[in-house]
Image (tube, grey):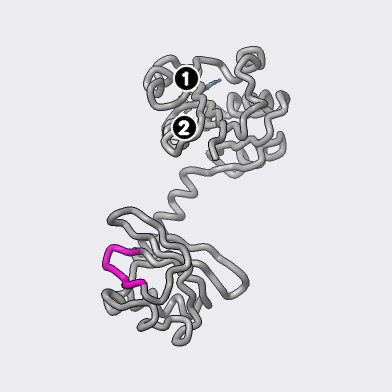
Amino acid sequence: MKKQFAVIGLGNFGYYLATGLFQKGHEVIGIDINPRQVQEIRDKVSRAVIADATDPQALRELELEKMDAVVIGIGSVLNSSILATLNVKDMGVKRIVGKAVSEAHGRILRKIGADDIYFPEKDLALTAAQRLDNPNVLDYLPFLEGYSIVQLAPPATFIGKNLIELDLINRFGIQVIAIQELVPENVVMIPTGRFVIKDSDVLVLLGPDQALAGLREKSS
Ligand code: ADP
């Protein structure tokens, strides 16, 4: 469903977030104090506006309270990040997403009303560490105690076999919940036993941590 977003501060984080949301079909207003940033994004979002987010008056006419979420992408100037967050909070914005450069910054934003905080450098570093640690585990989501959902490149022995032949459920207690096909791009949710695994597929698996770790070894 099409949603409405505003992104304030179109630095690296704000730029990619705003253009990414627009590419996914949402309505996006990009806002920055710097005319150059606004000019650069103009053709890649629904609307681009020059405004100082520390000035409540400048924000008022943008009707941010009607948005599904407002993202404050200002990070490095702490003062501006805080004032912008306060201003959108005062306007009654439904969901405020902040960007923090430090834990203390994150705590302040949360105290003054941000609903979600991103730590782009930290988040990216942790993802990078995980990928370097095991290049075949593309993503990892802890589930119930002792269980996880992982995205895994298929081990070589899986290629060309179907899910009945692999029988992961009886051999390891692992359920294949989805398969991401890369060529052409497609997601098969809850694949049937007849699905034949290709080299380019990514498996999304739910199962006990130990069994998943075993598969991971095989796939590396
Ligand atoms: P990044 O590290 O993602 O590039 P920055 O914090 O360096 O993030 O970028 C901040 C962006 O926010 C810049 O484009 C800057 O012009 C913009 N910005 C800074 N202060 C304000 C403000 N008061 N109102 C609107 N935009 C602002």
Identify the secondary structure beneath mark 2: helix
* Callout 1 secondary element: strand
Q: Which residue is mark 1?
A: 48
| Of pointers 1 and 2, the one earlier in the residue sequence | 2
**Image spot of residue 152 (x, y percent):** 39, 67
Residue at image coords 40%, 24%:
41
43 and 81: which is toward the camera: 43
Q: Quadrant of the C terminus?
A: bottom left
Q: Residues within 10 Å of mark 2 (few under 14, many from 20)?
A: many
Task: Give whichever of 203, 147 is nearer the camera.
Answer: 203
Magenta part of the chain = 195-201
Amino acid of disc 1:
Ala
Q: Where in the figure is residue 47, as x and y percent of width and height?
A: 48, 21
**Mark 2, residue position:** 18
Q: Residues within 10 Å of mark 1 (few under 14, many from 20)?
A: many
Is 104 above or below relative to 156? Answer: above
- Say which mark, if any, is on residue 99: none
Q: Residue at x 47, y 24 (%)?
A: 46
At 58% from the left and 67% from the top, the residue drawn is: 143
Q: Give the percent coordinates (x, y) of residue 63.
A: 64, 20
Q: Determine whether label 1 and label 2 are within 8 Å by CB.
A: no
The image quarter in which residue 165 lies? bottom left
C-alpha span from label 1 to label 2 = 10 Å
Towards the viewer: 180 or 114: 180
Q: Residue at x 63, y 14 (%)?
A: 61
Instruction: From this view, report whether residue 98 is shown above or below residue 220.
Output: above
Residue 159, how many percent across, how many down? 27, 74
